[in-house]
Image (cartoon, helix red, strand yellow):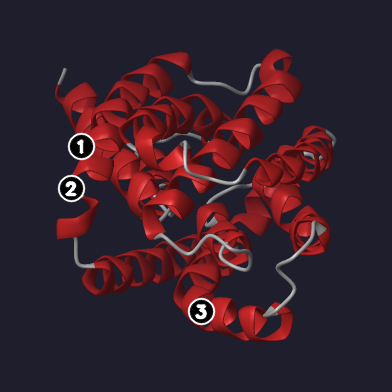
Amino acid sequence: MEKDIIILFVGMIVGAMNAIAGGGMLIGFPVLLSLGVPPLVANVTANIITPPGQLAAVFAYRNYLRKVPRRYVLILPFVALGALAGALTLRAMPSNNFAEMVPVLILFGVALFAFQPSLHLHLHSHLHGRKKNLLPILLIGVALLPITFYGGFFGAGYGFIMLAFLGLGKVHEVHMLAAMKNVSAILVSLISLAVLYSTGLIDWHIGLVMAVGTTIGGYLGARAAKRVSSYWLRIAVIVIGLAAAAHLGLKNY
């Protein structure tokens, strides 16, 4: 019972973070490992943990989502293709090899989170002005393929870079971007779940308990987004992510 309360509480934090900016599983993943969940199982289980919270966030952002230009739907096939390739690659990988990669993957996720604002400004300066046709949307879709591959393969930190790329188009309102990011993250998780469902790598008890937490946190996080200091949230995630990567690196190497 005590363990379930901890999992539920952590799920609320994960859901709130994902709703606001992404990166929730950079907190949730180390917690799952500390509870004795194998790295590969924790990674696959995340695909049932995060979607309910992201769906709750989309519901909270629904008025903003209605304002998103319809042409952004063209990004979704690229999201699906990249996620499918990433999940298939993960399915074919031995669990030992994946465990050795986890510290590097977490560091990559933390790096995406740390440098996302700078990356956004850099990319936007290169594509600025191409707003009168579908070309910017298609360019963003193609550029997202390696990112959505990463999302299907590991996923922690996917939301950060997704926000950076989505902001390259005409939409700049943060809540509209967050709504689109959560829609894409749901699609990535569902595709990964479909590919990995039959592998036996899902801890249903932990996953479902944490999913209840992410649902609550996702809705409340989206509602409270304007009151959250993104600066201190960013600092906390970077510190925890680096600590987790260092701990796993020392353990595995």
On the image, which quarter does residue 232 sit in? bottom left
| Residue shown at 27% from the left, 31% from the top | 7
x then y, percent, for residue 250: 50, 68
x then y, percent, for residue 26: 43, 54
Answer with left or right where residue 213 lies relative to residue 185. left
| Residue shown at 80% from the left, 54% from the top | 145
On the image, which quarter does residue 205 sit in? top left
The residue under label 2 is 224
- What is the distance, in whole Å, between disc 1 and disc 2 at their CAs? 6 Å
- Compared with 186, 123 (above or below) is below
- Labels 3 and 1 touching (C-beta < 8 A): no
Q: Tell me if mark 1 has few (under 14), some (14-19) or many (20+) residues whose alpha carbon lies within 10 angstroms of its own.
A: many
Q: Tell me if mark 3 has few (under 14), some (14-19) or many (20+) residues whose alpha carbon lies within 10 angstroms of its own.
A: few
Which amino acid lies under the numbered mark 3 shown in the image of this protein? Phe
- What is the distance, in whole Å, between disc 3 and disc 1 at their CAs? 26 Å
Residue 62 visible in the current orientation: yes
Which amino acid lies under the numbered mark 1 shown in the image of this protein? Leu
Which amino acid lies under the numbered mark 2 shown in the image of this protein? Ala
Looking at the rendered structure, the secondary structure element under dot 2 is loop
Instruction: Tell me, for residue 220, which label it has, or none.
Output: 1
- Labels 1 and 2 touching (C-beta < 8 A): yes
User: Which of 139 and 100 lies nearest the eye of the viewer?
Assistant: 139
- Compared with 190, 236 (above or below) is below
Position of the C terminus, as image quadrant, is bottom right
| Residue shown at 31% from the left, 36% from the top | 218
Answer with left or right where residue 253 lies relative to residue 220. right
Q: Earlier in the sequence, mark 3 or mark 1?
A: 3
